[in-house]
Image: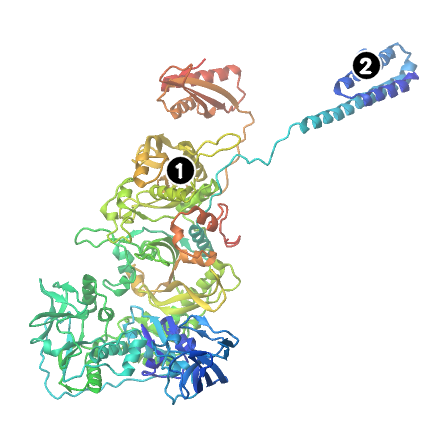
Amino acid sequence: MKFTLSWLSDHIASKAPLDEILALMLKAGLEVEDVHDPREALKAFSVCKVIEAEPHPDADKLRVCKVETVDGLKQIVCGAPNARAGMTAIYAPLGAFIPGLDFALDKKPRAIRGVESQGMMCSTKELNAGEDHDGIADLDASIPLGTSAAEALGLADPVIDFEVTPNRPDWLGVQGIARDLAAAGAGRFIPSDVKKVSGSFDCPIEIKLEAPEACPMFAGAMVRGVTNGPSPDWMQQRLKAVGVQPRSLLVDVTNFISLDRARPLHAYDAAKLEGVVTARLGKKGEKLVAIDGKTYTITEEMCVIADESGVIGLGGVMGGESTAVYAETTDVFIESAWFDPLRTARTGRATGIHSDARYRFERGVDPQSCVDGLNLALALILEYGGGTVSKANVAGLIPARADKVTFYPADVERLTGLTVKNADMRRILKDLEFNIEDAGDAWYLMPPSFRFDMEQSADIVEEIARMVGFDQLPTTSLPVPEGGIRAITTPMQARVRTARRVLASRGFLEAVTWSFMSKANAALFGKTPDSLTVANPVASDLNQMRPSILGNLASAAQRAANRGEAGARFFEAGPIYLDDGPNDQRTVVAALVRPLNERHWQGAPKPYDSYAAKADLFAVLEALGQPGERFQVTAPVQPHWHPGQAAALKLGPKVTVAHFGALHPGVLKQLGVEGPAFGFELNLNALPLMKTKTTKTKSVLERSELTPIRRDLAFLVDEKVPAADIVRHAQGADKQLISQVEVFDVYQGKGVPEDQKSVAFEVTIQPKEKLKDEDIQALMDKIVAAVAKGCKGVLRG
Amino acid sequence: MSDIVTIENEALAAIAGAGDLEALDAVRVAELGKKGRVSGLMGALGKMSPEERQENGPKLNALKTRVDEAVKARKAELEAEALERQLVTETLDLTLPPVPGPKAGALHPVMQVFEEIAAIFGDMGFSVAEGPDVEDDWHNFTALNFPEGHPARETHDTFFMKAAEGDTPKVLRTHTSPVQIRTMMDQKPPIRILVPGRVYRNDWDATHTPMFHQVEGLVIEKGTHMGHLKGCLIDFVRAFFEVDSVEARFRPHFFPFTEPSAEMDVKYTRKGETIEIGAGDSWMEILGSGMVHPNVLRNCGIDPNEYQGFAFGMGVDRLAMLKYGMPDLRPYFEADPQWTRHYGFAPWSTPSVSGGLS
């Protein structure tokens, strides 16, 4: 909402300078967004008098002027055709920045064709203050020397733009702004006494209300014989200052009252109205060509204004083209009605119309302003357009609010910590036009009709607090909670933090990517129910909540490669979505690498592969206190993994904790990512919660006094037997003694029968008591037997 | 036994003169070996009279010890020299590059700032609560006192999920405030929670992204008033920006779920591309806050006459920008390696109030 300082002074008697007004706006909750003070921009410029203007000795088009200025008598070389002796003009001193030309004058006088020039005389265009093309500004001779340029050009009025919060539609009128500023201490509010315009004939246009729930009140009157010329200069200037283009008296008057009083009106060309004007609900099949030239389909939900020709307007949203006023309009019918906010909002959304009227009606227009608004309009039209006014037709009535707000003055201190005297509270509420019935501990307040946000004591507390000023609030640190400060990190957060640090320390860069992706790409990674499809996506390829992070990471890796960073390692810890319920979101950690073939003088390092991904995943699990060896490695369950070079990590047959390995080449191709790519995705929600211990004390260290014994064994097994099976069976031979079984060699080829492989591993035995050679041999025999039984393994000689 | 002195002088000279281990060993055998001179003298002891033995025994033993020690000392010298000669030949060109490990990783600044904020509020007794991104209309709006059809809803640029005809569509939460509701429905006051999370609004330009991060705070206790809100948040910005003083101001605003409502601004100054927080002559809005609206408390079954408190919400991406000087929001979500390395944090940086946030 924009307004000017001089417009504000129509409604407030105040000597406060601009800075103070801005500070008070802030105090009262009117958030200033922009201030344009032309005086500031034109500070350097002032009115001068041209004493003498002689032709330049060396240039036909230039004149050498003697000019009386605030800085004394100056010689200025001027190229304007209209420069002449006796002229009143605008002077720019040396060094001044000329806003319209976007450069500053030299600080020292400059010779122009041999004649020194000690300044400049400006056109309004050069000052960004007009469009004159005839030369320099030619001002009224009565303006005294030294007057500021802003004042001389009638631009002395600062324009303030601020944010109107949805609860304060009364701030959409300058009068409403003035009321709050007066209450905040800017000066005395000037109440406006709207005089009834007495009509000389009965209004021939009948008004009928058929849907009082949508339009409970409609006041209208006609003016005959109007000259719909331009509106008066003062009105045009104000409208222009706040960015509204003046059009004609009738349109400008309705706009002006809307801006001045937050009271929207509509002007109809009475000659084009046919019969009774009715406010009713729309009917199926009706259409309206609105003043924006577009055709809208009417629904039974919408409130329309209609006459015998059909719909002529969308109530509170936009008028129709067929009855709009034109320059030739002589008879005008003014509508001042009230439309239900919710219905107006719905109609606005359904039609997509963003009009000033809709904006105001959906937030709430003062229901008691129908008749006053009409009278204001009639008076202005009569004054500036002439004609004769009819008596007003007023259909319906909006009863004044009946319920009072109970305010407990003690709530002010209870909720804000402010101590405010009752007398001050009373003064503030009176200034804000509340009617007060003081009953001691409880006050019964009748809020003014233009306030829709006053329901309970807390609402009144805010009114008091903002008028006292939030700067007066005490500053009190929060007391330590009862029982002291405790650790606050949830197990899930602790997991996320640890996982992130493990991966970053292993060379991964943390990414934060969109929670949404394209539905087609999402489908490569999991289910894409419609319940997770965004109906109004910001972009068509961001319309599905992601079932996995890997797609986004793969695309990121490709982008990085395109920028010359192939091999960048990414991870993200964030949400994935299974469905739209509150428990259907999972927190996962995903990592992805497109391997880079690196060279090194000692021999090329092994590129990142499925085993590297496993190592990174296991490092994370280890740090989370859940070593990877606890889980079973099975074939991948999710379809976006390479079926033979990726695996699922499971806890029992049902719970999949993670996947790792190579991404499916087909999936990468569809994503436009050059493969291969490896990584993992770990579902932190699927990891079992660690038992919380009652004590932080660690168990006593049981140090083994006996050194561990190591033996190597190699078996021939079918090539399809997973290494983990052999290890498991070997370990199972004696769980007490065997502390570790680690594969160190896998071999296929010469010396090994076809379809078989040789797997060699080291067994670590941790004796509890001294073992004899035959004890160890017996244990080896048990392992050989277990591997033979469990996976048909044959000990290699 | 006048040869003892002679033998010792000769033996020590021979030891000192031994040029390598082989020559030294020859000297050792010649003197101390079974057939050596010293051993010979020792052997002759047996044939001596007890008196002679008494006199010569200690002398001979001393001779043997001295020669033996001289051999050992010379041996150590010769071995050291030999090692020295050997090592000179065993050089590496250590200017060559080592086997490459992965380039250093980095933590995302937004995630780091989340942790910084949690550390500060943790010290004030807030615990962390979380909730779903896909929310229902009731938790995101209605329970927070956004009446249906209210224009305040429109200011949120809400993303709606597809819904069956006639069903109220779910939304992507437009703020972290629904977690206030979930917490108050679930748990009895006193409550002090901090809610970090992703939020979504349908807006994408130089200063807005369709997804961003918020932290929400909620305090519901007996006797908590707006002065506490002010004190708590001023304490927060001082700790967060890690500057000696931050000038802050509160001004009235409107949020449907708080009454009274306030926005908080901090003073800043712009130096070239970057922003310095704390001093200057401009104000920057950094968060919205207010006393929890009695209607919201009632919606959660809490009696507003018994319990009261405040809530606040702030944009983490912007706070990160203000503190660490990222000039633009958009690269936050682009997973650009250069950006992440430049603005990111080392894996071992763990924010804490006592140890320093950054």
The answer to whether A727 is drawn above or below residue A497 in the figure is above
Q: Quadrant of residue A393?
A: bottom left
Q: Which residue is mark 1?
A: A594
Residue at the location (80% across, 17% down)?
B27
| Residue A488 x %, y % | 43, 51
Q: Which mark is residue B30?
A: 2
Q: Secondary structure at mark 1?
A: loop
Q: Chain of mark 2?
A: B
Q: Which residue occupies the foreground of this view, B51 or A589? A: A589
Whether residue A434 is visible here, answered yes or no, is no
| Residue A378 x %, y % | 19, 83
- Answer with left or right where residue B88 lies relative to residue A174: right
Q: Quadrant of residue B158?
A: bottom left
Q: Which residue occupies the foreground of this view, A582 or A689? A: A582
Q: Secondary structure at mark 2?
A: helix
Location of the C terminus of chain A (image quadrant): top left
Q: Nearer the viewer, mark 1 or mark 2?
A: 1
Whether residue B289 is visible here, answered yes or no, is yes
